[in-house]
Image: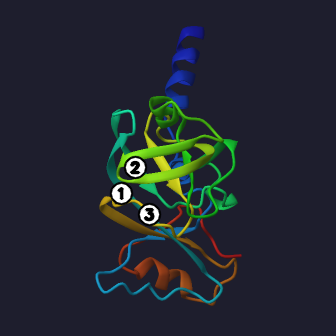
Amino acid sequence: VAGMAVAFTLQRTGERTGLEEWREQYGDFDAVTYPSLDGAEPALPEGSSVVVVRTGSVQLRAADGERTFADVTDLPAGDRRLRGATELVEGRAPRTAGEIALSRELAGALDVGVGDRLELDQPELSAEVVGLAEQTTCLSCHRIILAPGQDTLRRDDPGTQLLIDLPRTLAPGQRQQLEALPNVDLRTDWEPR
């Protein structure tokens, strides 16, 4: 019986709920969408806030010749709403051009730490490492986090997400309108108050 209880506990801890998976991807944001081809944002309820996040991949070549691939994003790592999705483990989030945060794995591969200057030949970049941050779904991923809105690295196929924080109160019928919007995913437990 004890063996069955241990086996059940191990199996249960390996299963994540939909809400846990959501928080690992989007933190405390209520909804996510992708821009339409015409660039128009979806019609959202008054009081909603939107954070635009661009992410893409790039091949890096350090000044010493070291090569690797990394995801590059302008995700606002210091935004409390991303708690659970991205965690700053040392230093702070980048605030301006010329500042970056790296995943621990990438910092180790490039032999840099907080306070060091990262020099890349490809793409051309000289930036101060101000923080180390982990993407909770991939601790072994190579990631560069730029200051929000910065696009200083040429990325392959940059993808854009709109992270949406919805107001806590909605007019009658607005939840159904949100659910009907194309390409908008709502957090599974989200309910207006």
Where residue 110 appears, as percent x and y from the top left, is 46, 33
Tell me the residue at 49%/41% (across/down).
137
Q: Give the quarter of the image for residue 41.
A: bottom left
The one of 44 and 107 positioned closer to us in this rendering: 107
The one of 151 and 188 positioned closer to us in this rendering: 151
Where residue 143 appears, as percent x and y from the top left, is 46, 45
Q: Could you give the CA–CA distance between mark 2 and mark 1, rounded to whole angstroms?
A: 6 Å
**Residue 92 in the figure: left or right of residue 134:** right
In this rendering, the answer to whether 80 lies above or below 86 is below
> What residue is shown with label 3?
152
Cβ atoms under marks 2 and 3 closer than 8 Å: no
Q: Could you give the CA–CA distance between mark 2 and mark 3, rounded to whole angstroms?
A: 13 Å
Q: Amino acid at mark 2?
A: Asp
**Disc 1 residue crowd, few under 14, some 14–19, many 20+, Cα 10 Å:** some
Tell me the residue at 33%/80% (across/down).
36
> What residue is shown with label 1?
56
Q: Amino acid at mark 3?
A: Thr
Where residue 184 appears, as percent x and y from the top left, is 42, 73
Image quadrant for the N terminus? top right
Q: Could you give the CA–CA distance between mark 1 and mark 3, rounded to whole angstroms?
A: 12 Å
> What residue is shown with label 2?
71
In this rendering, the answer to whether 27 lies above or below 180 is above
The one of 151 and 117 positioned closer to us in this rendering: 117
